[in-house]
Amino acid sequence: MSTGIILPPEVKDNPFKKAAEEISSLALAVQQIATVEEYTKAGELYRQHASAASKIKDFYDPKVEAAHKPWKALTDERKGLLDALDAGKKHLGRLMSSYEAAEAEKARRLQQEAERKQREAEEQWKKELKAEEDRRLEAAQVLQEEGLHEQAEALLNQTPVQEPEPMPPPTPVARPAVPKVSGMSARSAWKGRLKPDDCDPYPAEVSEQSQMRALVILCKAIGEGKVPPQAVELSQSFINKQASSFKSLLNYPGIEVYEEKIRVGRS
């Protein structure tokens, strides 16, 4: 079946294809190494792999380099233009996000102020209602003391002479003043980040020490089962560098240090 890739004749008909397939087949046919002779033969076959790989690289590298140069020039040119546009978008995005945050904070404060005024109005309404009720009770008590029981009962049952103001209406929800721009939309993307427990709200800049404190808190929560372990990703490259530096002396809880032989076949 055709792959759709057209190779030049010197690549398509190169002499290394068959040799690489034959050497690889010989290696894959080996099922086990149980004797010194078998180990020696495997080592020789391993060296043949390295020699063939070196010759194939020498054959392909100039052609790959020749094809890579124009591709690299075009991708670099494209990247430069896109990076310039991306920088402008990010700059405008930061300014627009700052404006949205400021408007949201302004709306939040207006809402809080409106709710405070509503609470005060409701409290005043209740005070006036109670004051009117107290006046009627006091007047009815005076009538009772004077023996005018029927008048006292009528006073308690009648509609108050001075009705209090109606209950204030609910506070309208304050909306941020963010206009809609034609051709542009925004969506919410919820994310998480390390946040020190002594920083509220999140600071513009977080020191490395604060980040480390937050990481320790997160790891402690993982140990207590409050946070899934997937929240922290192991840096395998860091662990390998530490193992390479300290070797068997490395003693991190939960980390096993082991030695792995890396074979090198000379061509």
Image: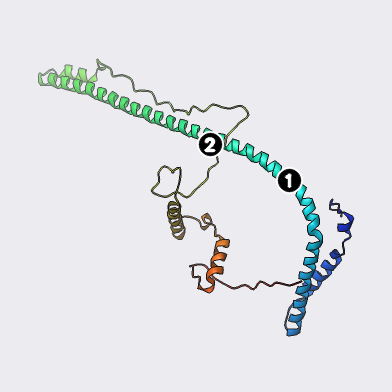
Give the distance between the C-alpha atoms of the residues marked 1 and 2, in whole angstroms: 31 Å
- SS for callout 2: helix
Residue drawn where x is 49% and y is 48% of the image = 193
Q: Residues within 10 Å of mark 2 (few under 14, many from 20)?
A: few
Q: Residues within 10 Å of mark 1 (few under 14, many from 20)?
A: few
Task: Find residue 50 and report its horizontal and vertical position in percent.
Answer: 76, 70
Residue topped by disc 1: 73
Residue topped by disc 2: 94
Query: Considering depth in this image, is 153 or 55 the residue closer to the camera?
Result: 55
Q: Amino acid at mark 2?
A: Arg
Task: Find residue 165 and report its horizontal and vertical position in percent.
Answer: 31, 19
Residue drawn where x is 67% and y is 41% of the image = 80
- Above/below status of 203 relative to 208: above
- Above/below status of 65 relative to 56: above
**Count of labels shown?**
2
Q: Amino acid at mark 1?
A: Ala
The part of the image, by quadrant, that contains residue 170 is top left
Q: In the drawing, what numbered circle is on residue 31?
A: none
- Above/below status of 45 relative to 17: below
Query: The N terminus is located in which quarter?
Result: bottom right
Residue drawn where x is 34% and y is 29% of the image = 116
- Above/below status of 81 relative to 144: below
For marks 1 and 2, the one nearer the N-term is: 1
Query: Considering depth in this image, is 171 or 175 the residue closer to the camera?
Result: 175
Question: Mark 1 touching mark 2, by CB under 8 A?
Answer: no
Task: Find residue 182 and report its horizontal and vertical position in percent.
Answer: 61, 27
The part of the image, by quadrant, that contains residue 157 is top left
Horizontal relation, residue 62 to residue 114: left or right:
right
